[in-house]
Image (cartoon, rainbow, N blue to C red):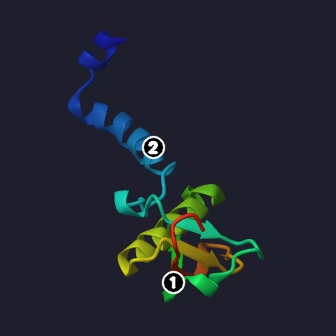
Amino acid sequence: MVLLFMSLKFSQLCFIALPITLLAGCTTPISQLNKDASSVQIRMDSSFDPANCQWQGDLTGSEGHWYTYLFYPNDVMVQGAVNQIKNRASQLGANTVYMMSPQDFTTSFTILGSAYNCPTGR
């Protein structure tokens, strides 16, 4: 196998490596989760009560575009949108996002939510 790669010209090797690299990029969301946003909780349940929380703002998170949606599976677009909304919540100083119903479009996935700073343990 090593001899095969050694005998290939640089252009041939690039021709082989480029599609592999591009396909590997299609398995991860574009929006990566920031380290400080990893503790932000996403809530969609009706038992969430924001009465003891401080509202920080409304948020959106979206992943996918008309020119990329063919290359990303739906779960990757969902994860990217979640990463984006958690990153934005963290930037506002929130630790909880109460998410509205997700919007699943043909070419992208968008989520809407309200960011709250809640006492620890909520």
Residue 42 in view of the camera: yes
In the figure, 80 relative to 103: above or below?
above
- The image position of residue 117, as x and y in percent, is 48, 78
Displayed quadrant of residue 42: bottom right
Mark 1 residue type: Leu
- Decide if residue 65 is in sight here: no
Q: Residue sitting at 60 percent across and 63 percent down?
A: 78
Seen from the viewer's position, the closer of residues 72 and 46 is 46
- Mark 1 Cα shell of 10 Å, populated few (<14), some (14-19), many (≥20): some
Instruction: Identify the residue shown where x is 52% and y is 81%.
Output: 115
Report the disc number at residue 24.
2
Which label number is shown at residue 59? 1
Q: Quadrant of the N terminus?
A: top left
Disc nearer the start of the sequence (2/1): 2
Q: Nearer the viewer, residue 13 or 81?
A: 81
Compared to 82, does 48 lie above or below?
Answer: below
Residue 44's image quarter? bottom right
Residue 75 location, quadrant: bottom right
Question: 122 left or right of 119?
Answer: right
Q: Nearer the viewer, mark 2 or mark 1?
A: 1
Tell whether 4 sits left or right of 112.
left
